[in-house]
Image: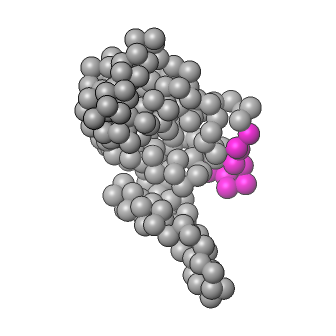
Amino acid sequence: LITVLRTMLLWKSRSTDKPADPAQQHHHKSKMQSIAKVFQLSVPVLLRECEELTPADSATALWAFAKVGVVPETLFSKLYDNVVEGAESLETPALAAALLVSARGIVGHLPVQRANADGAADAQNTHQDPAKPVICDWRLLDACEERVQASVQDFDTRDLTSVILAYSLAHAGSLELFAVLHKSCLDRCRL
């Protein structure tokens, strides 16, 4: 299921330009609605099977839902906990993506779907107000700081950018971390 969501999201990203032809615009809108529907249908399955997901799968699901633009709060919480518990096993691209999603959750940059009384996501109850309570905490950023410092050379430029943005956006990380990130950026610029 995670692979399907990731593939659909990548397909969506390749088709974000709105066509000029009115006939093609209808097809484009229909395709985007289909992708959103698949994500909505996957929520109960992911909630039920969340404990079985690897931390990498959980990180991919967090990234995918954040990219789609609507994050079910209950699902986010379970996936996030799974990522925090297994953060040491994440490969650097998954770690960078998870850190950035975490930071966006901390500062309120993720549109959150609150759950109804029956636990289902409420499509009408989506919040994008930056003043709303955060849906995330600093556990992942704090837990990964030493690893990021020790393996900064393993991040490619895009992932390093995500890591820097994550720690900056969340106002997290020590002076030592930012010194290591700064040096890594300078070293890459000199190449």
- Residue at 43% of width from left, 18% of height from top? 178
Of 82 and 146, nearer the camera is 146
- In the rendered image, residue 107, in percent from the top left (x then y), is placed at 62, 30
Left or right: 186 with respect to 119?
A: left
- In the rendered image, residue 24, in percent from the top left (x then y), is placed at 59, 84
Q: Say above or below: 61 vs 90.
A: below
As for residue 75 lying within the magenta part, the answer is no
- Residue at 45% of width from left, 44% of height from top? 62
- Residue at 55% of width from left, 40% of height from top? 74
- The quadrant of the image that shows the N terminus is bottom left
Question: Which of the colour schemes (rainbow, by chain, secondary structure, one colour) is used?
Answer: one colour
The span shown in magenta is 115-129
Residue 144 visible at all: no
View extreme (bottom): residue = 23
- The quadrant of the image that shows the C terminus is top left
- In the rendered image, residue 93, in percent from the top left (x then y), is placed at 33, 41
- Residue at 37% of width from left, 26% of height from top? 186
View extreme (front): residue = 190
As for residue 124 lying within the magenta part, the answer is yes
Residue 33 visible at all: yes
